[in-house]
């Protein structure tokens, strides 16, 4: 039984659980829950103690610093309007993560994760209903790529992270009942199949990485066994998906061709991303310490693209989180960004809770991998996923 300290604390928890549940289902609903928490935080008093709690968490300070550097980057920005738009997208690092780090409760961890997994099961069910032709495709969904509530770019990373959470539960929770173990196993299998009837390659890479991480966390005393089992599982799953999933087969073949024959495929999904990164690196070299400014990427890229790759479309962000930060804010920006991940690893490694340690190491690793293929902390879905899970995993350090 959870004992709430006040009606405000109770409201926080109900809204947090709602935010975790609504995240995979509706942007507006999730935003309402999150910003109601922020508003409640600012109107409920006790400001001295609240500030003290925020300042006592190094991750909260690093998050605020990362946002602040975006604001400082407006000083040498010519396109102030776009700079303000980028800063708006980064507002959760100023308000949401620091505040949530102080209000999440360890004893509600199961409810946070359970609400998220319940919502993923709803999304997964809709995906299968579309795939089997039971319901018509709607919103983002197509018959060959049935991701209804969000695009496959976000859906597959969500699915991969959910699979990690379920696998971690299966392997690390020795108190699971037979029914719970059967349910989690079934959920893992259905999500894994769903992963390969949809088209998100970054999420599929994240899925294989998640399997590897789980194996190393479970077989932590035998790295050889972890390596062998990981290779065996990934090989079997990859071969099966490549053989039986036309969508996965096509996207793998296209991806390989796009990389190996880059000059002939610069206007494909992979080819464009490679071009974006190459051009963005050139922008970074113009001012490697402080970058070109928070808002100047679209205009600067457009001018450079006319010279380097006029046959490839323009972009407002390079679909690579590292190159986005390097080009906008230089090495100073990148250091402030990577500091967040360093502190996450540090907090996780010092935790006495197996759950927090495992998730606390896995989540930043998975994001560090997929951010090579897109700016996943710029978009709503994946950035909010990252922030919501960070808010309870890293708020408990040695008090586990």
Image (cartoon, grey):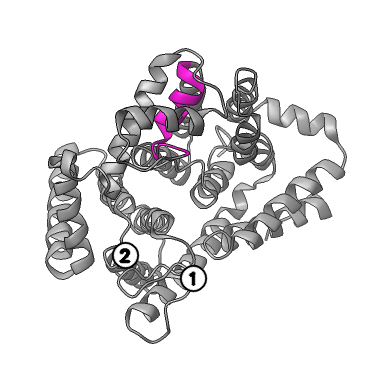
Could you say where residue 70 lies in the image, as x and y percent from the top left? Answer: 60, 26
Question: Where is the N terminus found, in terms of image quarters?
Answer: bottom right
Could you say where residue 201 lies in the image, as x and y percent from the top left? Answer: 29, 53
Q: Residue at x 34, y 37 (%)?
A: 372
* 81 relative position to 191: left or right: right
Q: Locate residue 358: give its quadrant.
A: top left
Check disc 2 and report its element: helix, strand or loop. loop
Is residue 323 rendered magenta in the image? yes
Crowding at label 1, few (<14), some or many (≥20) Cα neighbours within 10 Å? few
* 224 relative position to 117: left or right: left
Q: Main secondary structure of the magenta part?
A: helix
Q: Locate residue 183: give its quadrant.
A: bottom left
Q: Which residue is mark 2?
A: 198
Crowding at label 2, few (<14), some or many (≥20) Cα neighbours within 10 Å? many
Could you say where residue 23 lies in the image, as x and y percent from the top left? Answer: 56, 59
Residues in magenta, as a range: 316-331
The one nearer the camera, 260 or 196, is: 260
* 162 relative position to 37: left or right: left
Q: Spatial distance from mark 2 to mark 1, Cα to Cα?
A: 15 Å
The one nearer the camera, 349 or 75, is: 75
Q: Which residue is mark 1?
A: 139
């Amino acid at each position: 039984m959870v004992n709430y300290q006040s009606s405000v604390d109770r409201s926080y928890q109900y809204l947090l659980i709602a935010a975790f549940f609504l995240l995979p289902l509706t942007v507006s609903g999730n935003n309402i829950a999150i910003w109601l928490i922020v508003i409640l935080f600012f109107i409920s008093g006790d400001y001295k103690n609240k500030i003290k709690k925020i300042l006592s968490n190094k991750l909260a300070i690093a998050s605020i610093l990362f946002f602040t550097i975006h604001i400082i980057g407006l000083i040498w920005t010519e396109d102030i309007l776009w700079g303000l738009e980028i800063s708006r997208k980064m507002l959760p690092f100023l308000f949401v993560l620091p505040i949530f780090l102080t209000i999440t409760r360890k004893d509600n961890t199961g409810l946070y994760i359970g609400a998220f997994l319940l919502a993923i099961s709803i999304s997964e069910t809709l995906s299968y209903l579309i795939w089997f032709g039971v319901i018509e495709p709607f919103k983002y969904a197509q018959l060959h790529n049935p991701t209804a509530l969000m695009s496959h770019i976000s859906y597959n990373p969500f699915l991969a992270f959910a699979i990690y959470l379920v696998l971690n539960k299966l392997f690390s929770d020795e108190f699971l009942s037979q029914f719970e173990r059967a349910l989690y196993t079934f959920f893992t299998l259905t999500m894994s199949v769903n992963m390969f009837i949809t088209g998100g390659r970054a999420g599929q890479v994240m899925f294989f990485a998640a399997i590897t991480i789980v194996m190393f966390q479970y077989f932590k005393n035998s790295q050889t066994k972890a390596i062998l089992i990981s290779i065996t599982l990934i090989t079997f799953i990859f071969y099966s998906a490549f053989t039986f999933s036309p969508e996965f087969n096509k996207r793998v073949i296209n991806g390989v061709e796009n990389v190996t024959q880059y000059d002939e495929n610069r206007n494909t999904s992979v080819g464009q991303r490679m071009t974006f990164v190459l051009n963005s690196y050139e922008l970074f070299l113009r001012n490697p310490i402080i970058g070109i400014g928070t808002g100047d990427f679209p205009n600067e890229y457009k001018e450079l693209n006319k010279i380097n790759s006029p046959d490839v479309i323009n972009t407002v962000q390079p679909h690579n989180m590292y190159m986005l930060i390097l080009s906008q804010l230089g090495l100073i920006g990148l250091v402030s960004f990577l500091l967040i991940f360093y502190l996450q690893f540090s907090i996780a490694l010092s935790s006495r809770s197996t759950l927090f340690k495992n998730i606390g190491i896995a989540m930043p690793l998975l994001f560090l991998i997929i951010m090579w293929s897109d700016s996943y902390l710029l978009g709503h879905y994946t950035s909010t996923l990252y922030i919501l899970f960070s808010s309870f995993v890293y708020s408990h350090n040695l008090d586990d």
